[in-house]
Amino acid sequence: MRETPSGSSPGDPERVGSGTTVVRLRGEVDIVAALTLGPRLDALTAAPCPDLVLDLRPVSFIDCSGLSLLCRARNRVLARGGRLRLVVDGTPVLRLLRHTRLADVFEIGQHLPPGAVPAPDAVGPETAR
């Protein structure tokens, strides 16, 4: 396992274990957060066969910019033969994914996959409102 500095804000690493990158988002994933998070997710999905887990359990709000960000990451991962998983519980994120009929498009679980190392928060008060 290694820690890699993130692009969202200094000192916010993602965790990589067993080839799986886990990024934990929290707070509001809106247009402001998407501006910072977009380039970071693009970098994480640039390599062949990326294996990315986005932990969305601490997310309290997500708007259309956040959904667009998730869809873009999914499309980039699939185009490179990789895998994207979302970790979502009964938060507003899951409700929104169901209402927009995106719940069936993403691979969604309630817990981190076995062997995945929980990551520190990637989006917080300093990058999201």
Image (spheres, helix red, strand yellow):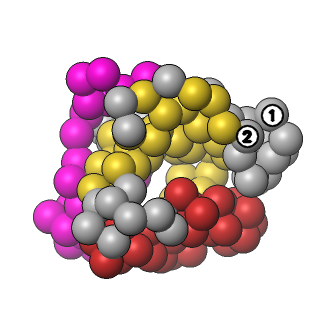
Determine whether 65 is above or below 1 in the image.
Answer: below
Q: How crowded is mark 1: few (under 14 residues within 10 Å), some or many (20 or more)?
A: few
- Which quarter of the picture shows residue 99? bottom left
Q: Circle 1 is placed at which residue position?
A: 11
Percent x, y of residue 27: 63, 43
Name the residue located 80 percent from the left edge and 34 percent from the top edge: 11
Tag nearer the camera, 1 or 2: 2
Residue indicated by mark 2: 5
Residue 122 is drawn in which quadrant?
top right
Residue 68: x percent and y percent?
A: 47, 76
The structure residue drawn at horizontal position 35% and vertical position 50%, both measured from the top left corner, is 51
**Residue 94 shows in the view:** no
The residue under the point 14% across, 64% down is 104
- Residue 43's x, y, as percent? 60, 63
Q: In this view, does 61 lie above or below 72?
A: above
Amino acid type of disc 1? Gly
| Residue visible at 59% across and 37% down in the picture | 14
SS class, disc 2: loop
Prevailing secondary structure of the magenta residues:
loop
- In the image, the segment drawn in magenta is 93-117
* Type of the residue with mark 2: Pro
- Distance CA(mark 1)–CA(mark 2): 6 Å
Q: Does label 1 or label 2 sit earlier along the sequence?
A: 2
Q: Answer with left or right where residue 107 lies relative to residue 66.
A: left
Left or right of 109: which side holds 43? Answer: right
46 sits to left or right of 29: left
